[in-house]
Image: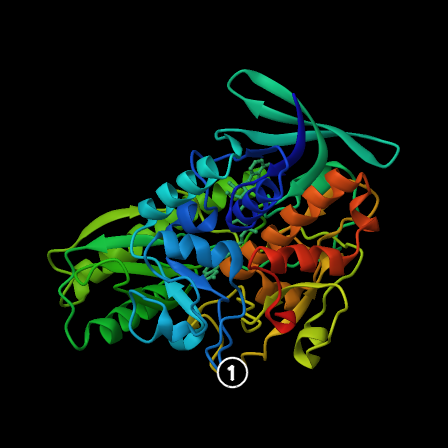
């Protein structure tokens, strides 16, 4: 099969990439290992869309496809400039530049509709598993499906796998840092009757269970009623490991499920408000925060974010704080008590940080783009990932149209096209 742009992975970055490339007139195929798009939002059940706005002023710094999707869901309206103009399910969250989704399945439907209306060809249950690279160019990507391996011949590939799978299979340089943030299994509990002390007692019960050795790690716990007032959506399980090692990932899935169940049982046994509760479900996938990243044409650093470095080739704006989860139990929050959350001023993300080295037709978007650990802990959030995807999609289409290698494109050209479509970095708007 021949195609202009092949997008591998349909998470927030892949969605942005596929829609961004199709909008520019490219023929696009999106392959996704799950039966739906959305990545961590839908595969892990995460309602928080972070990175839309500046923490300090509330001004929207990402619009484009991310905002269009929220408009589709009735959460935003065209022309919104401030985060306060956007609806959110959780009181107060708008302060943090975020949108909370009301329903995960509604997001799946919105993604399906956007892809179908955008003219993107979609293949679910399909895993990109091999590349053929000749003279510095990906000639073909093999995708594992129920019919065996499909051989796709793309002009440009966008690796939005979260794990830089395509870049790794193509022997592109990768960030050598072996450190990994812990994984988290999210879960939901129904029929919770919240009382003033419920959250405090739940926290104490989890701490005691950890001290007795019933729970190896945890954080928070964050108990949130984002989906319904009588529900607990829980992000508190913490499983250190390496999701690139298939055996370790399997172990982590089992451990994550086990820990989620243990937490719920402890609460049902000990915490007023949970007596009549029931376990709705976990996952379906454990959430993976950090794996491989490319070492691309520019490695965005934590220092550049802090110093708010201007990049001539800026194609997206980041705004989230550097959110590095440690591999240990932390009480009350995701971070040790002595660490203060310091949200940055909105910062530039350069085009070169999505350009892989060593292969002339590969772009990388989302949490595996080129950044050091600290910078990536900020750029990894959902909305920033989607903005990076949108830029990658736009650049891929420009590359196809102009028959230039992706590295030969100028970030300014990409930014101008993004701006014409209502997206791109806010600093240049
Ligand atoms: C537990 C957890 C909690 C988080 N909390 C928040 C939060 O509160 N707010 C926030 O904004 N962000 C949060 N994040 C971060 C954010 O969700 C992700 O970093 C962001 O979604 C990254 O998007 P992505 O598209 O790059 O990657 P992913 O969402 O990981 O998407 C990658 C997609 O590629 C698919 N895929 C992988 N390999 C292949 C392959 N070889 N072939 C085909 N398909 C493949 C996967 O199935 C997946 O759909 C959280 C992350 C985790 C793990």
10 Å crowding of disc 1: few (<14), some (14-19), many (20+): few
Q: Where is residue 347 shown, x and y percent of the image?
A: 64, 73
Q: What quarter of the picture does the N terminus occupy?
A: top right
Tag 1 residue:
340
Asked if residue 173 is positioned above or below residue 133 in the image, the reply reads: below
Residue found 59% across the figure and 63% down from its top: 379
Q: Where is residue 4 shown, x and y percent of the image?
A: 68, 32
Nearer-the-camera pick, 333 or 63: 63
Residue located farthest toward the right when viewing the structure as drawn: 135
Q: Quadrant of residue 136?
A: top right
Nearer-the-camera pick, 230 or 276: 230
Helix or strand or loop: what does disc 1 sit on? loop
On the picture, is 353 further left or further right than 202? right
On the picture, is 344 further left or further right than 370? left
Q: Where is residue 324 shown, x and y percent of the image?
A: 56, 68
Asked if residue 126 is positioned above or below residue 266 in the image, the reply reads: above
Q: Where is residue 190 shown, x and y percent of the image?
A: 19, 54
Asked if residue 221 is positioned above or below residue 152 in the image, the reply reads: below
Residue found 77% across the figure and 68% down from its top: 312
Tell me if the residue at label 1 has its CB under 8 Å from ligand 1. no
Residue located farthest toward the front when viewing the structure as drawn: 420
Asked if residue 229 is positioned above or below residue 131 in the image, the reply reads: below
Q: What quarter of the picture does the C terminus occupy?
A: bottom right
Residue located farthest toward the left when viewing the structure as drawn: 276
């Amino acid at each position: 099969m021949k195609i202009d742009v092949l997008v591998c992975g349909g998470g927030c970055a892949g969605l942005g990439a596929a829609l961004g490339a199709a909008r520019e007139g490219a023929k696009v195929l999106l392959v996704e290992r799950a039966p739906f798009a959305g990545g961590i939002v839908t595969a892990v059940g995460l309602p928080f869309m972070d990175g839309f706005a500046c923490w300090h002023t509330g001004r929207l710094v990402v619009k484009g496809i991310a905002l269009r999707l929220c408009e589709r869901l009735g959460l935003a309206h065209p022309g919104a400039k401030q985060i306060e103009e956007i609806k959110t399910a959780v009181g107060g969250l708008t302060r943090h530049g975020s949108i909370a989704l009301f329903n995960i399945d509604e997001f799946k439907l919105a993604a399906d509709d956007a892809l179908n209306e955008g003219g993107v060809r979609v293949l679910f249950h399909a895993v990109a598993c091999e590349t053929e690279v000749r003279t510095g160019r990906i000639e073909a990507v093999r995708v594992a499906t129920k019919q065996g391996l499909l051989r796709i011949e793309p002009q440009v590939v966008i690796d939005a796998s979260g794990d830089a799978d395509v870049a790794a299979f193509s022997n592109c340089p990768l960030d050598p840092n072996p450190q990994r943030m812990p994984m988290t299994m999210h879960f939901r509990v129904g029929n919770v009757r919240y009382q003033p002390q419920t959250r405090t007692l739940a926290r104490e019960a989890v701490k005691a269970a950890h001290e007795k050795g019933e729970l190896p790690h945890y954080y928070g716990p964050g108990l949130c009623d984002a989906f319904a007032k009588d529900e607990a959506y829980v992000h508190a399980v913490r499983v250190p490991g390496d999701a690139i090692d298939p055996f370790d990932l399997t172990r982590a899935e089992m451990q994550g499920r086990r820990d989620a169940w243990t937490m719920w049982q402890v609460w049902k046994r000990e915490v007023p408000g949970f007596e009549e509760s029931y376990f709705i479900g976990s996952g379906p996938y454990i959430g993976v925060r950090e794996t491989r990243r490319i070492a691309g044409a520019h490695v965005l650093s934590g220092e550049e974010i802090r110093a708010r470095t201007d990049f001539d080739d800026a194609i997206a704006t980041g705004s989230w704080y550097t959110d590095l989860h440690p591999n240990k139990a932390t009480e009350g929050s995701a971070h040790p008590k002595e660490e203060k959350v310091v949200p940055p001023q909105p910062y530039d993300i350069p085009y070169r940080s999505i350009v892989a080295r060593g292969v002339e037709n590969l772009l990388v978007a989302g949490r595996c783009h080129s950044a050091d650990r600290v910078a990536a802990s900020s750029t990894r959030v959902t909305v920033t990932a989607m903005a990076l995807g949108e830029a990658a999609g736009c650049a891929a289409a420009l590359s196809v149209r102009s028959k230039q290698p992706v590295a030969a494109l100028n970030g300014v050209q990409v930014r101008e096209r993004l701006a014409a479509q209502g997206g791109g970095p806010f600093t240049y708007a």
